[in-house]
Image (tube, grey):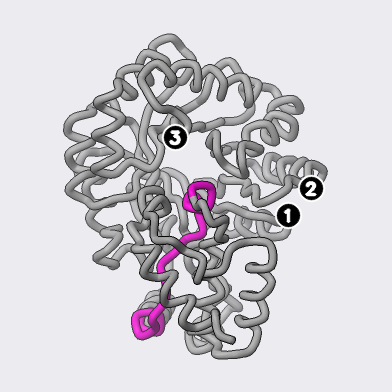
């Protein structure tokens, strides 16, 4: 078990990331996850500078992805994969994943030969293992796994909130993998940070637990306890966050009955709130012609719902000084096609606008 994704957000602080990589490796972890578009294309090159150029290749595992918005036709796919190898500075990936698969994306990937080309890449030794990352309904995942028996691993959005969420179908997706003996790599164990920065009522539930258990620890241990989970990825932005996550998963203890009851209590709090279920993956941002910082505005809206204080209005002003406001949304739908959560973003923008775009 490892806590594995070094998170890059905005400009990359290379010196800090080097420190994070060193501490991560020193703690006995070695799994790194990236993609061509992460941080506007800076993630792969940052990993090359902070990891690949400083450690022997056999000392770490590097996973990259074939992302749909970086290729148009079948002819683009192999050059893109070669470009990713070059950007990372490696001769091979330890695993190559088909990125953000769902029913529609899978159809496009299959029709354009993406699976065939990726498996050729594996056969040539340029990737050692093959899998998918998945954001979609369980029925689509079952279809993909049945039609693509070469899949060795599924990277799946999994946390104690989404597990029972009918819109995400976390349990059903997990069980689809478990039945087929395909191990799961967990992404979004902290649900974009929303299971760490809890609303006050939910925070009180966790604080009542003995032993000083933190919300992050509770969420990570919940994931680690699932028997078909091979890896837990937790995107982090500071050295302290990374160290805390590593310590939690170094020897994760089974959840106590009291801790399981606390998780149910946190779920109940969230279920009674009208929150936008955005994980801040930011896939939508690059496609927005109005330059709206969509996840940031959703975060502001959720903050307003959770805390009802002036702070949310202040941050709305901050985010819209250099980006579009919710009222600027033209409902073009480009963001909807990119959203792994299947959110009706234009409709949600209307809701955000009604709250914040006032005289």
The residue mark sitting in front, 2 or 3, is 3
User: Can you tell which of label 2 and label 1 is closer to the viewer?
Assistant: 2
Viewer can see residue 221 = no
> Quarter holding the C terminus?
bottom right
Going from N to C along the chain, the mark reached first, 2 or 1, is: 2
Question: For this view, does 245 lie left or right of residue 140?
Answer: right
Q: Give the residue at x 49% y 89%.
A: 201
Marker disc for residue 16: 2
Considering every residue shown, the one lying at the far right of the view is 15
Residue neighbourhood size for the residue with mark 1, other residues' Cα within 10 Å, grouped as few (<14), some (14–19), many (≥20): some
- For the residues labelled 2 and 3, the Cα–Cα distance comes to 27 Å
Query: Is residue 100 found left or right of 15 in the rendered image?
Result: left
Where are the magenta residues, as a range?
268-287
Query: What residue is pinned by disc 1?
Result: 239
Q: Nearer the viewer, mark 3 or mark 1?
A: 3
Q: Residue at x 17, y 39 (%)?
A: 143
Give the mark nearest the N terminus, 2 or 3.
Answer: 2
Mark 3–mark 1 distance (CA, rounded to whole Å): 28 Å
């Amino acid at each position: 078990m490892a806590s594995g994704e070094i998170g890059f957000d905005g400009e990359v602080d290379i010196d800090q990331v080097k420190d994070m990589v060193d501490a991560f490796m020193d703690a006995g972890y070695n799994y790194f996850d990236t993609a061509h578009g992460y941080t506007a294309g800076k993630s792969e090159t940052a990993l090359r500078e902070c990891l690949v150029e400083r450690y022997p290749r056999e000392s770490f595992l590097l996973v990259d992805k074939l992302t749909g918005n970086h290729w148009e036709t079948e002819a683009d796919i192999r050059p893109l994969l070669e470009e990713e190898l070059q950007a990372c500075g490696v001769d091979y990936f330890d695993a190559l994943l088909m990125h953000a698969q769902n029913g529609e994306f899978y159809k496009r990937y299959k029709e354009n030969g993406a699976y065939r080309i990726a498996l050729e890449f594996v056969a040539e030794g340029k990737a050692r293992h093959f899998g998918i990352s998945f954001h979609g309904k369980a029925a689509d995942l079952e279809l993909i796994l049945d039609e693509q028996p070469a899949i060795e691993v599924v990277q799946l959005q999994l946390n104690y909130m989404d597990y029972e969420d009918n819109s995400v179908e976390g349990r059903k997706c997990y069980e689809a993998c478990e039945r087929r003996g395909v191990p799961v790599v967990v992404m979004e164990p902290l649900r974009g940070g929303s299971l760490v920065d809890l609303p006050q009522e939910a925070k009180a539930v966790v604080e009542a637990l003995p032993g000083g258990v933190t919300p992050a620890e509770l969420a990570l241990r919940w994931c680690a306890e699932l028997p078909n989970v091979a890896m837990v990825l937790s995107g982090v932005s500071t050295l302290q966050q990374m160290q805390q996550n590593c310590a939690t998963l170094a020897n994760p203890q089974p959840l106590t009955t009291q801790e399981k009851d606390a998780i149910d209590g946190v779920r109940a709090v969230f279920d009674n709130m009208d929150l936008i279920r955005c994980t801040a993956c930011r896939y939508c941002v690059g496609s927005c012609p109005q330059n709206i910082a969509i996840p940031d505005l959703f975060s502001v809206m959720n903050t307003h719902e959770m805390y009802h204080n002036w702070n949310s209005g202040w941050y709305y002003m901050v985010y819209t000084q250099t980006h579009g406001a919710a009222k600027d949304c033209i409902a073009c739908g480009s963001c909807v096609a990119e959203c792994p959560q299947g959110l009706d973003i234009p409709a949600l923008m209307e809701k955000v606008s009604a709250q914040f775009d006032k005289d």
